[in-house]
Image (cartoon, rainbow, N blue to C red):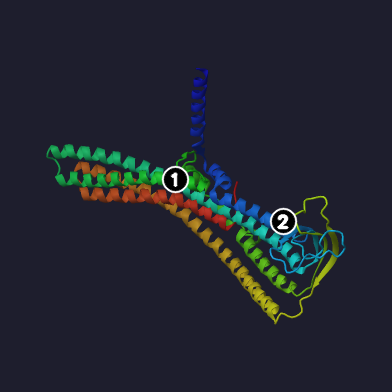
Amino acid sequence: MRKYIYGVFVFFFTGYITAQEKEMSLSMQEAIDYAIKNSYDNKVSLNDIEAAKKKKWETTTIGLPQVNGKVDYQNNLKQLFDAVDFNNDGFPDFGAKHSVNAGVTLSQLIFDGSYLVGLQSAKTYLKISEQAKEKTELATREAVINAYGNVLVTEKSIEILENNKKILEKNLNETQKTYDNGLTELENVEQLQITLGNVESNLRNAERLKEIAYQMLNVSLGNSIETKLTLTSTLDNLVIDNTDLSLLATQFNIDNHIDFKIAQNDRESKRLLMKLEKSKALPTLSAFVNYNAVANSNSFSFFETSQKWVNTSVLGVTLNVPIFSSFGRSSRTAQAKIALENADIRLEEAKQKLNLQVERAKSEYQLGIENYETAKKNLALAERIEKKQQVKFFEGISSSFDLLQAQNQLYTQQNNYVQSMLNVIAKKAQLENALNILLK
Protein backbone atom coordinates (compact mmCIF):
# COMPACT_ATOMS: atom_id res chain seq x y z
CA MET A 1 0.00 0.00 0.00
CA ARG A 2 2.86 2.33 0.86
CA LYS A 3 4.44 1.68 -2.55
CA TYR A 4 1.14 2.53 -4.22
CA ILE A 5 0.80 5.81 -2.27
CA TYR A 6 4.43 6.67 -3.03
CA GLY A 7 3.88 5.99 -6.74
CA VAL A 8 0.80 8.21 -6.83
CA PHE A 9 2.71 10.98 -5.04
CA VAL A 10 5.61 10.80 -7.48
CA PHE A 11 3.21 10.80 -10.44
CA PHE A 12 1.37 13.92 -9.30
CA PHE A 13 4.55 15.68 -8.18
CA THR A 14 6.20 15.02 -11.54
CA GLY A 15 3.06 16.17 -13.34
CA TYR A 16 3.04 19.34 -11.25
CA ILE A 17 6.67 20.11 -12.11
CA THR A 18 5.98 19.45 -15.80
CA ALA A 19 2.97 21.75 -15.71
CA GLN A 20 5.03 24.42 -14.01
CA GLU A 21 7.68 24.18 -16.73
CA LYS A 22 5.05 24.81 -19.41
CA GLU A 23 3.89 28.11 -17.91
CA MET A 24 5.85 31.37 -17.92
CA SER A 25 5.08 34.89 -16.76
CA LEU A 26 7.25 37.48 -18.51
CA SER A 27 7.61 41.22 -18.86
CA MET A 28 9.05 42.57 -22.11
CA GLN A 29 12.57 42.86 -20.66
CA GLU A 30 12.36 39.44 -19.02
CA ALA A 31 11.34 37.97 -22.38
CA ILE A 32 14.37 39.61 -24.04
CA ASP A 33 16.77 38.35 -21.36
CA TYR A 34 15.29 34.87 -21.55
CA ALA A 35 15.51 34.73 -25.35
CA ILE A 36 19.15 35.87 -25.41
CA LYS A 37 20.00 32.82 -23.30
CA ASN A 38 17.55 30.28 -24.72
CA SER A 39 16.57 31.12 -28.29
CA TYR A 40 17.51 28.67 -31.00
CA ASP A 41 19.78 31.10 -32.85
CA ASN A 42 21.68 32.05 -29.70
CA LYS A 43 22.24 28.41 -28.75
CA VAL A 44 23.70 27.83 -32.22
CA SER A 45 25.90 30.94 -31.81
CA LEU A 46 27.30 29.59 -28.53
CA ASN A 47 28.07 26.27 -30.21
CA ASP A 48 29.79 28.12 -33.06
CA ILE A 49 32.02 29.92 -30.54
CA GLU A 50 32.95 26.61 -28.91
CA ALA A 51 33.72 25.16 -32.34
CA ALA A 52 35.90 28.20 -33.13
CA LYS A 53 37.83 27.70 -29.88
CA LYS A 54 38.44 24.06 -30.80
CA LYS A 55 39.52 25.15 -34.28
CA LYS A 56 41.96 27.64 -32.75
CA TRP A 57 43.49 24.90 -30.60
CA GLU A 58 43.62 22.56 -33.59
CA THR A 59 45.68 25.15 -35.48
CA THR A 60 47.93 25.72 -32.45
CA THR A 61 48.76 22.02 -32.17
CA ILE A 62 50.32 22.00 -35.66
CA GLY A 63 53.38 23.74 -34.17
CA LEU A 64 53.55 21.47 -31.11
CA PRO A 65 55.42 18.14 -30.92
CA GLN A 66 53.74 15.31 -32.80
CA VAL A 67 54.20 11.64 -31.92
CA ASN A 68 53.13 8.92 -34.34
CA GLY A 69 53.46 5.16 -34.10
CA LYS A 70 53.42 2.70 -36.95
CA VAL A 71 53.44 -1.08 -37.25
CA ASP A 72 53.93 -2.89 -40.60
CA TYR A 73 53.34 -6.63 -40.86
CA GLN A 74 54.05 -8.65 -44.00
CA ASN A 75 53.22 -12.26 -44.80
CA ASN A 76 55.08 -13.49 -47.88
CA LEU A 77 52.48 -15.87 -49.29
CA LYS A 78 54.77 -16.88 -52.13
CA GLN A 79 58.55 -16.59 -51.72
CA LEU A 80 61.00 -16.39 -54.65
CA PHE A 81 63.91 -17.61 -52.54
CA ASP A 82 64.59 -19.03 -49.11
CA ALA A 83 65.18 -16.82 -46.10
CA VAL A 84 68.80 -15.66 -45.53
CA ASP A 85 70.47 -15.72 -42.12
CA PHE A 86 73.49 -13.45 -42.49
CA ASN A 87 74.58 -13.75 -38.84
CA ASN A 88 74.07 -17.51 -38.54
CA ASP A 89 72.20 -16.93 -35.30
CA GLY A 90 69.15 -18.97 -36.27
CA PHE A 91 66.98 -15.94 -37.14
CA PRO A 92 66.37 -14.92 -40.78
CA ASP A 93 67.56 -11.42 -41.69
CA PHE A 94 66.01 -11.28 -45.16
CA GLY A 95 63.35 -13.12 -47.17
CA ALA A 96 61.54 -14.54 -44.13
CA LYS A 97 57.93 -15.63 -44.46
CA HIS A 98 56.81 -13.18 -41.72
CA SER A 99 58.23 -9.72 -40.99
CA VAL A 100 57.27 -6.88 -38.65
CA ASN A 101 58.50 -3.29 -38.67
CA ALA A 102 57.38 -1.19 -35.64
CA GLY A 103 58.43 2.39 -35.04
CA VAL A 104 57.71 5.64 -33.23
CA THR A 105 58.45 9.08 -34.69
CA LEU A 106 58.63 12.38 -32.80
CA SER A 107 58.44 15.40 -35.11
CA GLN A 108 58.62 19.11 -34.37
CA LEU A 109 57.90 22.04 -36.68
CA ILE A 110 60.68 24.61 -36.32
CA PHE A 111 59.67 27.26 -38.84
CA ASP A 112 56.73 27.60 -41.22
CA GLY A 113 55.39 31.00 -42.26
CA SER A 114 52.01 29.47 -43.09
CA TYR A 115 51.71 28.20 -39.51
CA LEU A 116 52.30 31.66 -38.03
CA VAL A 117 49.65 33.13 -40.30
CA GLY A 118 47.35 30.24 -39.40
CA LEU A 119 47.60 31.13 -35.72
CA GLN A 120 46.54 34.70 -36.48
CA SER A 121 43.71 33.44 -38.70
CA ALA A 122 42.42 31.17 -35.92
CA LYS A 123 42.11 34.19 -33.62
CA THR A 124 40.27 36.07 -36.36
CA TYR A 125 37.96 33.10 -36.90
CA LEU A 126 37.13 33.05 -33.18
CA LYS A 127 36.42 36.77 -33.28
CA ILE A 128 34.06 36.24 -36.23
CA SER A 129 32.05 33.72 -34.17
CA GLU A 130 31.92 36.05 -31.16
CA GLN A 131 30.76 38.95 -33.34
CA ALA A 132 28.15 36.72 -34.95
CA LYS A 133 26.79 35.97 -31.47
CA GLU A 134 26.57 39.68 -30.67
CA LYS A 135 24.76 40.25 -33.97
CA THR A 136 22.40 37.40 -33.15
CA GLU A 137 21.62 38.91 -29.74
CA LEU A 138 20.63 42.20 -31.36
CA ALA A 139 18.43 40.40 -33.90
CA THR A 140 16.90 38.27 -31.14
CA ARG A 141 16.10 41.33 -29.06
CA GLU A 142 14.31 43.02 -31.97
CA ALA A 143 12.46 39.80 -32.87
CA VAL A 144 11.22 39.34 -29.28
CA ILE A 145 10.09 42.97 -29.06
CA ASN A 146 8.10 42.61 -32.27
CA ALA A 147 6.64 39.22 -31.28
CA TYR A 148 5.77 40.42 -27.75
CA GLY A 149 4.21 43.59 -29.19
CA ASN A 150 2.18 41.58 -31.72
CA VAL A 151 0.62 39.56 -28.91
CA LEU A 152 -0.34 42.72 -27.02
CA VAL A 153 -1.72 44.35 -30.16
CA THR A 154 -3.83 41.28 -30.91
CA GLU A 155 -5.18 41.24 -27.37
CA LYS A 156 -5.90 44.98 -27.57
CA SER A 157 -7.71 44.47 -30.88
CA ILE A 158 -9.82 41.70 -29.34
CA GLU A 159 -10.70 43.98 -26.44
CA ILE A 160 -11.76 46.76 -28.83
CA LEU A 161 -13.75 44.38 -31.06
CA GLU A 162 -15.56 42.87 -28.07
CA ASN A 163 -16.52 46.35 -26.92
CA ASN A 164 -17.70 47.27 -30.44
CA LYS A 165 -19.72 44.06 -30.56
CA LYS A 166 -21.49 44.86 -27.27
CA ILE A 167 -22.38 48.37 -28.47
CA LEU A 168 -23.64 47.05 -31.82
CA GLU A 169 -25.73 44.32 -30.16
CA LYS A 170 -27.31 46.97 -27.93
CA ASN A 171 -27.98 49.26 -30.90
CA LEU A 172 -29.39 46.39 -32.97
CA ASN A 173 -31.66 45.32 -30.10
CA GLU A 174 -33.02 48.86 -29.67
CA THR A 175 -33.44 49.34 -33.44
CA GLN A 176 -35.26 45.99 -33.71
CA LYS A 177 -37.71 47.10 -31.02
CA THR A 178 -38.21 50.41 -32.79
CA TYR A 179 -38.87 48.57 -36.05
CA ASP A 180 -41.28 46.19 -34.33
CA ASN A 181 -43.23 49.28 -33.20
CA GLY A 182 -43.26 50.55 -36.80
CA LEU A 183 -41.11 53.59 -36.04
CA THR A 184 -38.14 52.82 -38.32
CA GLU A 185 -37.38 51.02 -41.57
CA LEU A 186 -36.19 47.42 -41.94
CA GLU A 187 -33.13 48.71 -43.80
CA ASN A 188 -31.81 50.24 -40.58
CA VAL A 189 -32.05 46.87 -38.81
CA GLU A 190 -30.39 45.05 -41.69
CA GLN A 191 -27.61 47.63 -41.88
CA LEU A 192 -26.75 47.09 -38.22
CA GLN A 193 -26.91 43.31 -38.73
CA ILE A 194 -24.34 43.58 -41.54
CA THR A 195 -22.03 45.71 -39.40
CA LEU A 196 -22.39 43.36 -36.44
CA GLY A 197 -21.62 40.35 -38.66
CA ASN A 198 -18.42 42.00 -39.90
CA VAL A 199 -17.30 42.81 -36.35
CA GLU A 200 -18.01 39.24 -35.21
CA SER A 201 -15.99 37.88 -38.16
CA ASN A 202 -13.08 40.19 -37.35
CA LEU A 203 -13.26 39.15 -33.71
CA ARG A 204 -13.05 35.43 -34.56
CA ASN A 205 -10.10 36.11 -36.84
CA ALA A 206 -8.36 38.16 -34.13
CA GLU A 207 -8.79 35.30 -31.66
CA ARG A 208 -7.14 32.90 -34.11
CA LEU A 209 -4.33 35.39 -34.72
CA LYS A 210 -3.82 35.68 -30.99
CA GLU A 211 -3.02 31.97 -30.74
CA ILE A 212 -0.55 32.24 -33.63
CA ALA A 213 1.03 35.36 -32.09
CA TYR A 214 1.68 33.49 -28.83
CA GLN A 215 3.22 30.60 -30.77
CA MET A 216 5.49 32.99 -32.69
CA LEU A 217 6.60 34.55 -29.41
CA ASN A 218 7.39 31.10 -28.02
CA VAL A 219 9.51 30.32 -31.07
CA SER A 220 11.45 33.58 -30.69
CA LEU A 221 12.01 32.71 -27.00
CA GLY A 222 13.26 29.21 -27.85
CA ASN A 223 10.27 27.52 -26.23
CA SER A 224 7.87 24.86 -27.37
CA ILE A 225 4.94 26.53 -29.13
CA GLU A 226 2.66 24.91 -26.54
CA THR A 227 4.24 26.79 -23.62
CA LYS A 228 1.64 28.91 -21.83
CA LEU A 229 2.73 32.54 -21.55
CA THR A 230 1.43 35.31 -19.35
CA LEU A 231 2.60 38.77 -20.43
CA THR A 232 2.94 41.24 -17.58
CA SER A 233 3.82 44.32 -19.66
CA THR A 234 0.91 46.30 -21.09
CA LEU A 235 0.77 47.97 -24.49
CA ASP A 236 0.03 51.38 -22.98
CA ASN A 237 2.99 51.20 -20.57
CA LEU A 238 5.33 50.00 -23.31
CA VAL A 239 4.38 52.94 -25.51
CA ILE A 240 5.13 55.34 -22.65
CA ASP A 241 8.46 53.62 -21.89
CA ASN A 242 9.45 53.61 -25.56
CA THR A 243 8.57 57.23 -26.29
CA ASP A 244 11.92 58.92 -25.82
CA LEU A 245 12.76 61.75 -28.20
CA SER A 246 16.14 62.25 -26.49
CA LEU A 247 17.24 59.08 -28.28
CA LEU A 248 17.19 61.09 -31.51
CA ALA A 249 20.08 63.18 -30.20
CA THR A 250 22.27 60.14 -29.45
CA GLN A 251 25.63 60.35 -31.20
CA PHE A 252 26.45 57.43 -33.45
CA ASN A 253 29.84 55.82 -32.85
CA ILE A 254 30.40 53.66 -35.90
CA ASP A 255 33.51 52.03 -34.44
CA ASN A 256 31.35 50.31 -31.82
CA HIS A 257 28.72 49.05 -34.28
CA ILE A 258 28.74 45.30 -34.69
CA ASP A 259 28.23 45.44 -38.47
CA PHE A 260 31.25 47.73 -38.84
CA LYS A 261 33.31 45.42 -36.63
CA ILE A 262 32.26 42.47 -38.79
CA ALA A 263 33.32 44.38 -41.93
CA GLN A 264 36.67 45.20 -40.31
CA ASN A 265 37.16 41.58 -39.35
CA ASP A 266 36.35 40.52 -42.90
CA ARG A 267 39.05 42.86 -44.15
CA GLU A 268 41.48 41.43 -41.62
CA SER A 269 40.73 37.89 -42.83
CA LYS A 270 41.49 38.98 -46.41
CA ARG A 271 44.74 40.59 -45.27
CA LEU A 272 45.78 37.37 -43.56
CA LEU A 273 44.87 35.41 -46.68
CA MET A 274 47.25 37.56 -48.73
CA LYS A 275 49.90 37.17 -46.04
CA LEU A 276 49.38 33.40 -46.15
CA GLU A 277 49.95 33.28 -49.91
CA LYS A 278 53.13 35.32 -49.51
CA SER A 279 54.37 33.05 -46.71
CA LYS A 280 54.21 30.03 -49.01
CA ALA A 281 57.33 31.36 -50.76
CA LEU A 282 59.33 30.97 -47.51
CA PRO A 283 61.21 27.78 -46.61
CA THR A 284 59.91 25.41 -43.95
CA LEU A 285 62.09 23.68 -41.38
CA SER A 286 61.20 20.68 -39.21
CA ALA A 287 63.05 18.05 -37.16
CA PHE A 288 62.28 14.45 -36.27
CA VAL A 289 63.49 11.56 -34.14
CA ASN A 290 62.60 8.01 -35.18
CA TYR A 291 62.98 4.70 -33.37
CA ASN A 292 62.33 1.43 -35.24
CA ALA A 293 62.35 -2.24 -34.33
CA VAL A 294 62.44 -4.88 -37.11
CA ALA A 295 61.86 -8.61 -36.79
CA ASN A 296 61.78 -11.48 -39.32
CA SER A 297 60.66 -15.06 -38.80
CA ASN A 298 59.57 -18.09 -40.80
CA SER A 299 56.83 -18.67 -38.22
CA PHE A 300 54.63 -16.12 -36.44
CA SER A 301 56.72 -15.90 -33.25
CA PHE A 302 56.75 -12.14 -32.65
CA PHE A 303 55.14 -12.40 -29.22
CA GLU A 304 57.67 -14.92 -27.95
CA THR A 305 60.56 -13.82 -25.75
CA SER A 306 63.04 -15.69 -27.94
CA GLN A 307 62.19 -13.54 -30.99
CA LYS A 308 65.10 -11.40 -32.07
CA TRP A 309 64.46 -7.72 -32.89
CA VAL A 310 66.85 -5.34 -34.68
CA ASN A 311 66.63 -1.77 -33.34
CA THR A 312 67.42 1.43 -35.28
CA SER A 313 67.16 5.13 -34.38
CA VAL A 314 67.35 8.20 -36.61
CA LEU A 315 67.59 11.95 -35.91
CA GLY A 316 66.91 14.21 -38.87
CA VAL A 317 66.11 17.71 -40.06
CA THR A 318 64.01 18.55 -43.12
CA LEU A 319 64.36 21.85 -44.98
CA ASN A 320 61.85 22.47 -47.75
CA VAL A 321 62.68 25.43 -50.01
CA PRO A 322 60.14 26.55 -52.66
CA ILE A 323 62.09 27.43 -55.80
CA PHE A 324 59.78 27.76 -58.79
CA SER A 325 56.01 27.25 -59.09
CA SER A 326 55.51 28.47 -62.67
CA PHE A 327 54.17 31.71 -61.18
CA GLY A 328 51.35 29.84 -59.44
CA ARG A 329 52.17 31.44 -56.06
CA SER A 330 52.35 34.94 -57.50
CA SER A 331 48.97 34.39 -59.17
CA ARG A 332 47.37 33.30 -55.88
CA THR A 333 48.97 36.27 -54.10
CA ALA A 334 47.56 38.64 -56.73
CA GLN A 335 44.09 37.15 -56.25
CA ALA A 336 44.39 37.61 -52.48
CA LYS A 337 45.44 41.23 -53.01
CA ILE A 338 42.34 41.86 -55.14
CA ALA A 339 40.16 40.26 -52.42
CA LEU A 340 41.74 42.65 -49.88
CA GLU A 341 41.00 45.64 -52.10
CA ASN A 342 37.39 44.49 -52.39
CA ALA A 343 37.21 44.18 -48.60
CA ASP A 344 38.40 47.81 -48.31
CA ILE A 345 35.63 48.86 -50.69
CA ARG A 346 33.03 46.90 -48.70
CA LEU A 347 34.30 48.44 -45.47
CA GLU A 348 33.75 51.94 -46.82
CA GLU A 349 30.35 50.89 -48.15
CA ALA A 350 29.40 49.53 -44.71
CA LYS A 351 30.39 52.84 -43.12
CA GLN A 352 28.15 54.85 -45.44
CA LYS A 353 25.23 52.41 -45.16
CA LEU A 354 25.37 52.34 -41.37
CA ASN A 355 25.34 56.14 -41.17
CA LEU A 356 22.37 56.20 -43.55
CA GLN A 357 20.64 53.46 -41.54
CA VAL A 358 20.90 55.52 -38.35
CA GLU A 359 19.48 58.63 -40.00
CA ARG A 360 16.62 56.65 -41.53
CA ALA A 361 15.89 54.86 -38.23
CA LYS A 362 15.79 58.21 -36.39
CA SER A 363 13.40 59.63 -38.98
CA GLU A 364 11.12 56.58 -38.84
CA TYR A 365 11.12 56.57 -35.04
CA GLN A 366 10.19 60.26 -34.91
CA LEU A 367 7.49 59.65 -37.52
CA GLY A 368 6.20 56.71 -35.48
CA ILE A 369 5.80 58.90 -32.40
CA GLU A 370 4.07 61.63 -34.44
CA ASN A 371 1.72 59.08 -36.04
CA TYR A 372 0.87 57.73 -32.60
CA GLU A 373 -0.03 61.19 -31.30
CA THR A 374 -2.11 61.84 -34.42
CA ALA A 375 -3.86 58.46 -34.19
CA LYS A 376 -4.64 59.10 -30.53
CA LYS A 377 -6.31 62.43 -31.37
CA ASN A 378 -8.13 61.00 -34.38
CA LEU A 379 -9.50 58.15 -32.29
CA ALA A 380 -10.92 60.56 -29.74
CA LEU A 381 -12.56 62.55 -32.55
CA ALA A 382 -13.94 59.42 -34.23
CA GLU A 383 -15.43 58.23 -30.93
CA ARG A 384 -17.21 61.56 -30.42
CA ILE A 385 -18.52 61.58 -34.00
CA GLU A 386 -19.79 58.00 -33.70
CA LYS A 387 -21.57 58.74 -30.42
CA LYS A 388 -23.23 61.83 -31.92
CA GLN A 389 -24.37 59.78 -34.92
CA GLN A 390 -25.83 57.18 -32.59
CA VAL A 391 -27.86 59.85 -30.80
CA LYS A 392 -29.01 61.36 -34.10
CA PHE A 393 -29.90 57.93 -35.47
CA PHE A 394 -32.09 56.97 -32.54
CA GLU A 395 -33.68 60.43 -32.57
CA GLY A 396 -34.59 59.86 -36.23
CA ILE A 397 -32.62 62.81 -37.62
CA SER A 398 -29.82 60.70 -39.14
CA SER A 399 -29.87 57.68 -41.45
CA SER A 400 -28.31 54.28 -40.94
CA PHE A 401 -25.89 55.13 -43.75
CA ASP A 402 -24.55 58.09 -41.76
CA LEU A 403 -24.19 55.89 -38.69
CA LEU A 404 -22.41 53.23 -40.76
CA GLN A 405 -19.91 55.78 -42.05
CA ALA A 406 -19.21 56.99 -38.52
CA GLN A 407 -18.79 53.43 -37.28
CA ASN A 408 -16.43 52.45 -40.10
CA GLN A 409 -14.42 55.59 -39.48
CA LEU A 410 -14.21 54.70 -35.79
CA TYR A 411 -13.10 51.14 -36.52
CA THR A 412 -10.42 52.40 -38.92
CA GLN A 413 -9.10 54.86 -36.34
CA GLN A 414 -9.12 52.16 -33.66
CA ASN A 415 -6.99 49.94 -35.88
CA ASN A 416 -4.66 52.85 -36.76
CA TYR A 417 -4.25 53.67 -33.09
CA VAL A 418 -3.35 50.13 -32.06
CA GLN A 419 -0.93 49.72 -34.97
CA SER A 420 0.69 53.08 -34.19
CA MET A 421 1.35 51.87 -30.64
CA LEU A 422 3.16 48.79 -31.95
CA ASN A 423 5.01 50.95 -34.48
CA VAL A 424 6.48 53.15 -31.74
CA ILE A 425 7.81 50.10 -29.91
CA ALA A 426 9.16 48.45 -33.06
CA LYS A 427 10.79 51.61 -34.46
CA LYS A 428 12.53 52.31 -31.16
CA ALA A 429 13.98 48.78 -31.20
CA GLN A 430 15.06 49.34 -34.80
CA LEU A 431 16.77 52.62 -33.88
CA GLU A 432 18.55 51.04 -30.92
CA ASN A 433 19.82 48.31 -33.23
CA ALA A 434 21.01 50.92 -35.72
CA LEU A 435 22.84 52.71 -32.89
CA ASN A 436 24.05 49.32 -31.61
CA ILE A 437 22.44 49.90 -28.22
CA LEU A 438 21.51 46.95 -26.01
CA LEU A 439 19.52 48.47 -23.16
CA LYS A 440 19.31 46.33 -20.03
- Residue 165 position within the rendered picture, expressed as x and y whole percent measured from the top left: 29, 41
Say if 10 sits above or below 201 in the image: above
Residue lying furthest bottom: 326
Q: 439 left or right of 368?
A: right
Query: Disc number at residue 241?
Result: none
Q: 295 left or right of 131?
A: right
Query: Disc number at residue 57?
Result: 2
Q: Residues within 10 Å of mark 1 (few under 14, many from 20)?
A: many
Q: Which residue is mark 1?
A: 215
Q: CA distance from mark 1 to mark 2?
A: 41 Å
- Residue 388 position within the rendered picture, expressed as x and y whole percent measured from the top left: 28, 44
Q: 414 left or right of 185?
A: right
Residue lying furthest front: 82
Residue sitting at x 50%, y 54% = 427
- Residue 381 position within the rendered picture, expressed as x and y whole percent measured from the top left: 35, 48
Amino acid type of the residue that numbered disc 1 sits on in the rendered structure: Gln
- Residue 301 position within the rendered picture, expressed as x and y whole percent measured from the top left: 77, 53
Q: Could you say which is closer to the camera, residue 217 or residue 50?
A: 50
Element type where label 2 sits in the image: helix
Residue sitting at x 49%, y 37% = 22
Residue 190 visible within the image: yes
Q: Of the residues under marks 1 and 2, which one precedes in the sequence?
A: 2
Say if 319 sits above or below 408 in the image: below
Residue 398 visible within the image: no
Element type where label 1 sits in the image: helix
Amino acid type of the residue that numbered disc 2 sits on in the rendered structure: Trp
